[in-house]
Image: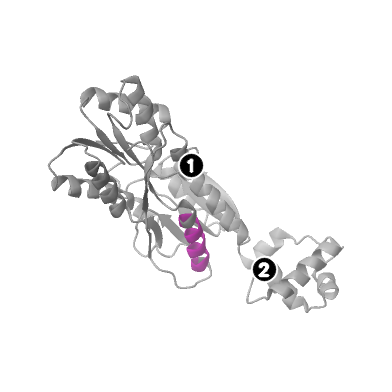
Amino acid sequence: MTNIKDVAKEAGLAVGTVSRVLNNRGYISESTRKKVYDAMERLNYKPNEIARSLYRKRSNILGVIVPSVSHPFFAELTGYIEFYAYQAGYKVMICNSYADRTKEKDYIELINRNQVDGFIATIYTKDSEEYINSSLPLVTIDRSFDGIPYITSDHYDGGVQATKFLIEKGCKKIAHISGELGIATIANNRSKAFYDVVSQSDIEYVVKEAKLATFEEYKKSAVKLFQEHPDIDGVFASSDIIAASLIHVAGLYNRLVPKDLKIVGYDDIDMAAMTVPPLTSIKQNIEKIAELAVNVLLDKIEGRNVAIANVLPIDLIERKTT
């Protein structure tokens, strides 16, 4: 049976060099790495992943906790995380928490059992500090905990731009569909920005909270909004899927978008350009969020210094709903 010594001999390298390539440890030039991989291919050598993991006390698996991978934003985010993790030699375990505190805690425990090397987590529950601490190889998205690096967008700026844009477009009564304001997510800064802007403007406004839900559930909330506030002429939605539900329901009430109702979404996921009419949205760079999250987590796993706050800029993408 072919072993690492055979690979070293075939590649013309020391066994220790081949070991460093296989375990991705220390500096290895691309030419040396290629020699090892070419020798492995010629000999049809497959490293024993289980043995390597036990030796290094690593699983080469990163965990990703999201409320639900079926939600379009988290689907895109998870896809990019998997891409960049794979590029770095890691596989990804996807964990749907459904915003359940017990599930989040159980998943985090996988770190202590050496079943994953670390987690990229979107935490949507209260009192999570009990099982999250700075010693864990953990990176959060849109949530700040003491000593834990986090990735986020400049949501305050996003909220300011969305609200001012609707006012500039002539809206006189604006609804804001926020996330759950009782959970201390950084994303709720977009709602704080909304309040700050409208409080300085001579317009009416209404704020409605929305939990993470399905498109059909968002449609029911949209119906209730239009029934309670038929004079609304602008909406700043905290996600593109909420905005899409509003576009759909507006048609049922014969409200033409953008003539009678202007809508700004948030995230600029792929579906934003596919709605009818195409949706104006605040763009988060989801790919960059994912790439940065993977890189920061790997740096933390390797014991390198990492920045705690990692804030990315946003952009307003104007389409036909405004």
Left or right, residue 294 beside residue 55: left
Tell which of 52 and 22 is nearer to you. 22
Count neighbours of disc 2 (C-alpha within 10 A) and say few if under 14, some if 14 to 19, many if 20 or more.
some
Q: Nearer the viewer, mark 1 or mark 2?
A: 1
Q: Taking the image as drawn, is residue 96 in sight?
A: no
Q: Does the magenta-highlighted stretch encompass residue 290?
A: yes
In the displayed structure, 53 sits above or below 243; it is: below
Tell which of 185 and 280 is nearer to you. 280
Q: Residue at x 40, y 64 (%)?
A: 134
Residue 140, position as x, y percentages in the image: 42, 56
Q: Residue at x 27, y 28 (%)?
A: 260
Residue 174, position as x, y percentages in the image: 22, 36
Q: Residue at x 49, y 73 (%)?
A: 304
Residue 292, position as x, y percentages in the image: 48, 61
Q: Which residues are magenta?
A: 289-300
- Give the residue pinned by disc 1: 270
Q: Secondary structure at mark 2?
A: helix
- Give the residue pinned by disc 2: 23
Instruction: Find residue 30 and name its label.
Output: none
Which quadrant is the N terminus positioned in? bottom right
Q: Amino acid at mark 2?
A: Asn
